[in-house]
């Protein structure tokens, strides 16, 4: 049997070590170090927004963005924010921490992104923003979302945690919104273990974000008129992320090669695979997903167990937000059905796309997947 194949492995073969040595030799460890500034400049330039603000992780990036928007735009408590139900909990919990109400929209069955046709149904006079999440490395269809946002005067936040360097109609994801948030967690296209960034072209919003992420220090040090958090990123983390940003195109190339290979080798299994392309983008395969057909008796959980017994690590798909026990307890859910997200969870899982994956391992993984059926 093959050695254990993790679902993801990073490649640290660029300037990561050199930049870390530089931090240690120069003594710049904290958040006021030069790599933090460099990452903010280089990553916002790369994505096409004016400003960046580094934070501790991608969840914190959403927390502080919503907090800053709520204050700046004077949103009342219980204002509503539209979010895809097929998503990680970060955006929804950020809403709740900020006394905003998350409103969940079902996924679209081919791309697994928010179903843009269902967004207008949930808009009320309390709706203030849409958080667009580019799920699993394929962009959401932004043009209809931008139209809706204009029509109802809503802010757009792009959660591009899974879409560094991805484009929509040739323009970078993260550049279409009032603010875009990214994660630099280990399995992301750019990683420094933990980390995140908010991008915006609005200087006032940037200043608010910087204020809330830094304990709400005022001009007079240690005098505070508000409560925030310490969400500052260290120079050490930023050093690694800067090195990773330098080779993002290579990382994307590797991911696309793995994705294309899986598409070819798994084309005959009774399952839907990650959507390879749409009219506006090609998949970057942040992950490669498999959704087993309805008429096949096996569900994702069993398939994953069987693959683990063959030393292949996988991950479940997102458990829909509208089914989360914590949100039931908080009584923020309604009875609307969102069957696509539910089916994706029941039948979907994702397989290894580590940056060190060899063709031999890809062959092994796909053979074991075919054996499931
Ligand atoms: C879409 C999305 N948003 C937010 C996050 C949260 O990022 P972090 O783990 O850095 O807090 C993730 C993490 O995987 C994510 O995939």
Image: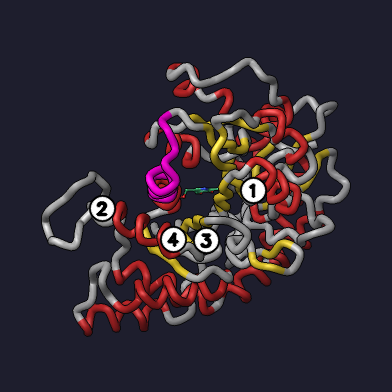
Image disc number at residue 230: 2
- Calculate the distance from the C-alpha at mark 2 to the C-alpha at mark 1: 28 Å
Residues drawn in magenta:
64-77
Q: Which residue is mark 3?
A: 9
User: Which residue is depicted at the point 42% across and 73% down?
Assistant: 39
Disc nearer the start of the sequence (2/1): 1
Q: Nearer the viewer, mark 3 or mark 4?
A: 4
Q: Nearer the viewer, mark 4 or mark 1?
A: 4
Q: Is residue 62 magenta?
A: no
Q: Is residue 365 visible?
A: no
Q: Residue furthest right?
A: 268
- Calculate the distance from the C-alpha at mark 3 to the C-alpha at mark 4: 22 Å
User: Which residue is depicted at the point 23% across and 45% down?
Assistant: 226
| Mark 3, other Cα within 10 Å: few <14 / some 14–19 / many ≥20 | some
- Calculate the distance from the C-alpha at mark 4 to the C-alpha at mark 2: 14 Å
Q: Which residue is mark 4?
A: 197
Q: Are marks 1 and 3 in contact (CB under 8 Å)?
A: no
Q: Secondary structure at mark 3?
A: loop
User: Which residue is depicted at the point 58% across and 71% down?
Assistant: 48
In screen coordinates, is 130 left or right of 237? right
How far from the left and from the top, in percent, is residue 195? 40, 59
Q: Main secondary structure of the magenta part?
A: helix
Q: Nearer the viewer, mark 2 or mark 1?
A: 2
Confirm if mark 2 falls within 8 A of ligand 1. Answer: no
């Amino acid at each position: 049997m093959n050695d254990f194949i993790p679902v993801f492995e990073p490649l640290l073969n660029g300037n990561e070590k050199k930049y870390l040595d530089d931090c240690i030799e120069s003594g710049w460890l904290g958040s006021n170090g030069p790599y933090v500034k460099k990452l903010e400049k280089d990553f916002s330039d790369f994505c096409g927004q004016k400003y960046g603000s580094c934070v501790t992780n991608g969840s914190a990036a959403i927390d502080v963005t919503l907090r800053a928007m709520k204050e700046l735009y004077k949103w009342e408590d219980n204002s509503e924010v539209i979010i895809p139900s097929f998503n990680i909990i970060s955006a929804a919990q950020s809403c709740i921490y900020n006394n905003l109400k998350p409103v969940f929209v079902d996924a679209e069955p081919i791309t697994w992104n928010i179903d843009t046709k269902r967004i207008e149904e949930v808009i009320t006079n309390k709706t203030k923003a849409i958080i667009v999440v580019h799920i699993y490395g394929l962009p959401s269809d932004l043009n209809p979302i931008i139209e809706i946002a204009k029509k109802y005067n809503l802010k757009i936040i792009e959660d591009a945690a899974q879409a560094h360097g991805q484009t929509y109609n040739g323009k970078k994801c993260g550049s279409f919104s009032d603010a875009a948030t990214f994660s630099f967690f280990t399995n992301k296209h750019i990683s420094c273990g933990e980390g995140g960034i908010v991008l915006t072209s609005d200087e006032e919003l940037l200043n608010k974000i910087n204020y809330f992420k830094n304990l709400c220090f005022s001009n007079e040090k240690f005098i505070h008129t508000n409560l925030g958090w310490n969400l500052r990123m260290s120079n050490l983390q930023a050093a690694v992320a800067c090195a990773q940003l330098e080779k993002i195109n290579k990382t994307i190339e590797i991911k696309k090669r793995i994705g294309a290979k899986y598409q070819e080798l798994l084309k005959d299994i009774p399952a839907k695979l990650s959507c390879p392309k749409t009219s506006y983008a090609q998949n970057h395969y942040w992950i490669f997903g498999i959704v087993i057909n309805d008429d096949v008796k096996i569900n994702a959980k069993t398939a994953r167990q069987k693959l683990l017994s063959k030393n292949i690590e996988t991950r479940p798909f997102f458990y829909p937000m509208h089914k989360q026990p914590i949100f039931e307890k908080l009584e923020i859910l309604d009875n609307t059905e969102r069957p696509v997200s539910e089916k994706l969870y029941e039948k979907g899982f994702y397989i290894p796309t580590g940056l060190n994956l060899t063709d031999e391992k890809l062959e092994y993984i796909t053979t074991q997947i075919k054996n499931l059926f």
